[in-house]
Amino acid sequence: MGRKWRVRRPAWVEIYLDRIAANARLFQRKLGRAQLAAVVKADAYGHGIEGVSAALYRSGVRWFCVSTGDEAHRLRDVCPRARILLMGPVDRRDLRDLLLRNVTFTLFTIDFADELDSVASRAGRRAVVHLKIDSGMNRLGVPWRQAGDFSLRLGLFRGVSVEGVYSHLATALENPSFMQIQRRRFERSLQEMRRLGVIPRIRHLANTGGVLVSRAFHYDMARVGLGLYGVTPQESHAARLGLSEAMVVKARLISVKWVEPGEGVGYGLAGRVRKLTPVGVVQVGYADGLDWRRGADSVAHFRGRPLPFLGRICMDQSFLDLTAVADDISVGDPILILGDDGLFPAQSRGPDFWEMSKVTGTIPYEVMTDFGKRLPRIYKP
């Protein structure tokens, strides 16, 4: 049996689990009687599905949403009694294992209902499903006008039990009028199902944005993803709600060089210096989530003081102008790349997800999931 190696890296991600739990409590209070379902797909948006899910379950969350079968298995390993809604499609070969682990499936085609029925019957179980309605996203789901007839046909499958019905909002708070259109379509689907005698126990429509726009979107359950991690679809809402971002990225200084005036730094010599400049290297690059498009006006922080980035971000390293801290910093010192570790005033923290996404022309979802791919995580209770 080979040795299990432990390797330490000079860059890491800190995940503040208490902040995630506090964010969940804020949303649950806003939801009132409706249940909060924690969306932990994409490895909990880069925060780590096992650590995040276990912490949320301890704090009282009982429903979780994932997108893939492997995410469902990983979640079940750490939360044996949690309710798990698998929102994505499933390969037929994986159905039995997921069924035996009490995973709830998303259903939106008759063919999948037939497959589930067959597998469930052979296993002596009933497959619990949530019917997905397409109310305007035009991605996955039964067209909303056909929801009644489709749900009635599901009665032919004795191995399938329809517990819930849901839809997904295509727009967030930037387009509340279309959110209302989708809600009305969802309501019409529910009415038609009721008319035909199909009354699912759990109805859910809202994501983070839906929770914030109106109580009319809450129904019996709401799927909160982005908000759990301290970010909202519109930048200003997070602070207004009192949410806290849970991810902090740090890297140790691994090298310092004094670069002569007129010299360039990095690929393409893109980081030109006008005076004798102390240039530091940290081992975090675009393979770790630090976007290559990040501009020279971006900064990291050391003990509350800003350090401008220089030149282009490399795959594994990046450059910092250490002029402001040259007499105070040493190789091995930790530098704050992103987020707030609570050690210094707010104006001295690293950029948040919205700030970083605007610099690079992307969205906060991509920033947080990118940082979760390669850097080791340290969980803060």
Image (spheres, rainbow, N blue to C red):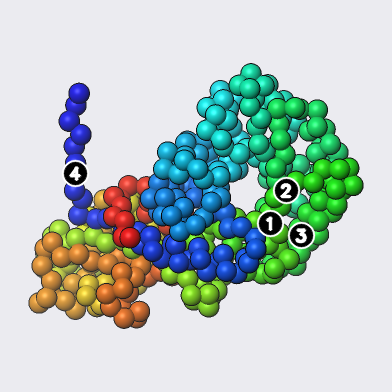
Circle 2/circle 3 CB separation < 8 Å = no
Q: Which residue is under mark 2?
A: 201
**Amino acid type at image mark 1:** Asp
**Amino acid type at image mark 4:** Val
Please tell me which residue lies in front, 357 or 200: 200
Callout 4 environment at 10 Å: few (<14), some (14 to 19), or many (20+)?
Answer: few
Any mark on residue 183, and which?
3
**Amino acid type at image mark 2:** Arg
Circle 1/circle 2 CB separation < 8 Å = yes
Using the numbered discs, state the Cα–Cα distance from disc 4 to disc 2 in whole angstroms. Answer: 48 Å
Residue located 17% across and 30% down the image:
3
Please tell me which residue lies in front, 117 or 14: 117
Using the numbered discs, state the Cα–Cα distance from disc 4 to disc 3 in whole angstroms. Answer: 50 Å
Using the numbered discs, state the Cα–Cα distance from disc 4 to disc 1 in whole angstroms. Answer: 46 Å
Quick one: label 3 or label 1, which is nearer the N terminus?
A: 3
Quick one: label 4 or label 2, which is nearer the N terminus?
A: 4
Callout 2 environment at 10 Å: few (<14), some (14 to 19), or many (20+)?
Answer: few
Q: Nearer the viewer, mark 4 or mark 2?
A: 2
In the picture, measured across the screen, residue 254 lies left or right of residue 91, that is left
Circle 4/circle 3 CB separation < 8 Å = no
Q: Quick check: 115 above or below 197?
A: above
Quick one: label 2 or label 3, which is nearer the N terminus?
A: 3
Residue located 90% across and 47% down the image:
195
Using the numbered discs, state the Cα–Cα distance from disc 2 to disc 3 in whole angstroms. Answer: 18 Å
Residue located 27% across and 74% down the image:
343
Circle 4/circle 2 CB separation < 8 Å = no
**Amino acid type at image mark 3:** Arg
Q: Nearer the viewer, mark 2 or mark 3?
A: 2
Q: Which residue is under mark 1?
A: 220
Quick one: label 4 or label 1, which is nearer the N terminus?
A: 4
Any mark on residue 7, and which?
4
